[in-house]
Amino acid sequence: MRSKLLQMLIDHQGDFVSGEAISQFLGCSRTAVWKHIEELRKAGYKLEAAPRKGYRIIHQPNLVTENEIKAGLSTTYIGKTVVYEKSVPSTQGIAHRLASEGAKEGTLVVADEQVSGKGRLGRPWLSQIGTGIWMSLILKPKIPPQRAPQLTLLAAVAVIRGIHEYTNIQCDIKWPNDILLNGKKLVGILTEMQADPDQIHSVIIGIGINVNQNNFPEEISDIATSLKIEKGEEINRAGLLQSIMVQFEQLYELFLKDGFSQVKLMWEAYATTIGRRITARTISGSLEGYASGITDEGVLLLEDDFGKVHKIYSADIEF
Ligand code: BT5
């Protein structure tokens, strides 16, 4: 109910909405409206109340709580169930637990802070409080487990398009899971799976987006950037998150209906890795060569100096 009230006030931004209109819209008493308004104030909203005029929003805090994400979210199922926590070890852990307890497809776990955010191969993901979008999305696609990596690429396209739609900033993709802005890392994506050899139970897509950081801890200050650093202004995190959910749902529906080919074309259009000379550092050593493309499974093809094509399943790429 509070997210409906919030959406109503946001839709009338600047204008008063009468207590009567709100109580009719929500189907509750004027006293209940007043209680909800007080709750929003406690959450950091500045709301003006005027006799005979009603209420209006003066200031919205930059939050990613359930109410903010749900207010005005125009998807059917992606991000429609939100589990918000202020501080967690990692949203991935919570999403894994919820998935095995039967959470619905599209359930989104979001936190303001992760104290042990995870990257790939046990690396850390630094997730400072209140600055980024740290989220894990639960999917239950009926596809063979070998196709799950395609969802990492789909997620990257969804995030790029969502960021562009909301901020007009154009980023690019570095295979397989990084989104870069002006050559620095803006987004990391971590895909994990609960599956039997021939059947997926859940795919957990973890996405970390640097949004409003002014600076970073020393260990990543040379390689990381945020939307605020590049754009010079603060970005509303819930608005951006909604924009990404909308893009995600459209692409995911396309993927389930028509397969990977269209998503692959979009991914290739955003990828700076393809068509360049690269070094791929894998756990079994380094390979140098020309990145000629990706396969339908999202595997990177690297042609070495002897013309031999190698399939790269997992690696760090350097240009
Ligand atoms: C990734 O790993 O890029 C995947 C990151 C996924 C994070 C999300 S946040 C929500 C969900 N919950 C989690 O616990 N994880 C997911 P990888 O490619 O291994 O990159 C990790 C490397 O990126 C680190 O070793 C650092 O060098 C760098 N790094 C760490 N934090 C960063 C940040 N905030 N911004 C940019 N680079 C960062």
Image (cartoon, rainbow, N blue to C red):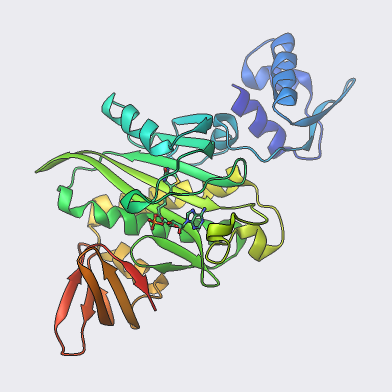
169 to the left or right of 278: right
218 to the left or right of 267: right
Front residue of 3 and 311:
311
Compared with 140, 43 (above or below) is above
| Quadrant including the N terminus | top right
| Quadrant including the C terminus | bottom left
Compared with 273, 129 (above or below) is above
Front residue of 308 and 104:
308
Query: From this viewpoint, which residue is outermost toward the bottom?
Result: 306
For residue 294, say whether it is visible: no
Image point (25%, 62%), residue name = 314
For residue 222, say whether it is visible: yes
Query: From this viewpoint, which residue is outermost toward the right?
Result: 51
In the image, residue 265 lies at what x, y percent? Answer: 32, 70
Front residue of 22 and 158:
158
Image point (44%, 38%), residue name = 79
In the image, residue 159 lies at what x, y percent? Answer: 46, 56
